[in-house]
Image (tube, helix red, strand yellow):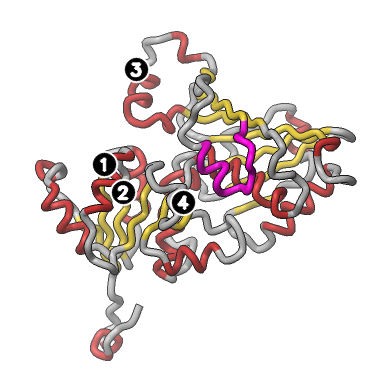
Amino acid sequence: MLRSHAQKDAGFEMRHKVFVDGQEGTTGLRIHEYLAQRADIEVLSIDSERRKDAAERARLLNAADVAFLCLPDDAAREAASLVTNPRTCLIDASTAHRTAPDWVFGLPELAPGQRERIRAATRIANPGCHASSFILLLRPLVDAGIVAPDLPISATSITGYSGGGRKMIEQYERGADPRLAAPRPYGLSLVHKHIPEMLAHTGLRTRPLFMPVVGAFYKGLAVSVPLHFSQLAAGTDGRALQRAFEQRYAGERFIRVMPISDPATLEGGFFDVMGANDTNRVDIFVFASDSQAILIARLDNLGKGASGAAVQAMNVHLGVDEGLGL
């Protein structure tokens, strides 16, 4: 950011103004935690009794350099319509704009050039938690020609209950229902809000068969995708999959490609879904036999899967250190 000579002489650094619309929810609260430690950020606050006042929200949205929309889809669309300041950058954490052509998908690791698109954009759609893991597994393989765009893909995601928002968190933490102790598959209507972005940002043309499962733990998420080598490009084996990930994510500070058939995981016998918690990191795993593979992408569903990803996108847009505050 440019500074005047007087500001430079005084050693004063201008601060970016940031507003979180919907700051009471799980994602908004976590974003506030990230921003609270930042000397370069001035958080614009709204009085609690005025948080549904459209005029006051519009004032703050238009006063902000960056505004996070931590709202339901319809409310996020309404908030976006209140912004008239061309310099205000919106980062929408809802599903409302994740496939909209005039919004940039806020996943810097998506593909070459994505950071430049985020940097130039004033409308950024934050990825979903399940979708981030799925996309980071499939996009490199589709781009490399290993997975055909028309190949039917299935995926399972295991996630902590914080992904369900305040109501689900309260339900689990009351502990009154013994059924909550067991994993709970959902999305069994075969309709899930993340599927459109899974298609739009992987290059797949066939709708994936996706089943999420919520477990009795607060946070952590792992998406697994099974593959048969006979259905992939000729000559594909586990090492070819591993190389594709290593090549795509070389130099990415927030993506860690783990050793093939990770010895530490195999020794323990069980996969740790919470192994990336309290980080902004995605861990990529390939477990392979001579004919099949299971791919797993693991992240913190409140970090890289939500609030951390939003702050990372803000950092890219503002041109500051991408890991600042993360």
Cα distance, mark 1 to mark 3? 29 Å
Residue 107: x percent and y percent? Answer: 51, 54
Q: Nearer the viewer, mark 3 or mark 4?
A: 4
Q: Please report the bounds of the magenta region as a residue range.
A: 195-208
Please report whichever mark, 1 or 4, sits nearer to the chain's N-terminal start: 1
- The residue identified by callout 3 is 174
- Callout 3, which amino acid? Arg
Q: Quadrant of the N terminus?
A: bottom left
Cα distance, mark 1 to mark 2? 9 Å
Q: Which label belongs to residue 69? A: 2
Tell me if label 4 and label 2 are in contact, CB under 8 Å.
no
Looking at the image, which is closer to me, 49 or 77? 77
The structure residue drawn at horizontal position 56% and vertical position 41%, both measured from the top left corner, is 198
What secondary structure is marked by label 2? strand
What secondary structure is marked by label 4? helix
Residue 194: x percent and y percent? Answer: 49, 37
Tell me if label 3 and label 4 are in contact, CB under 8 Å.
no
Pointer 2 local density, CA inside 10 Å: few below 14, some 14–19, many at least 20:
many
- Residue 234 drawn above or below residue 176: below
Q: Is residue 58 left or right of residue 215?
A: left
- The residue identified by callout 4 is 309
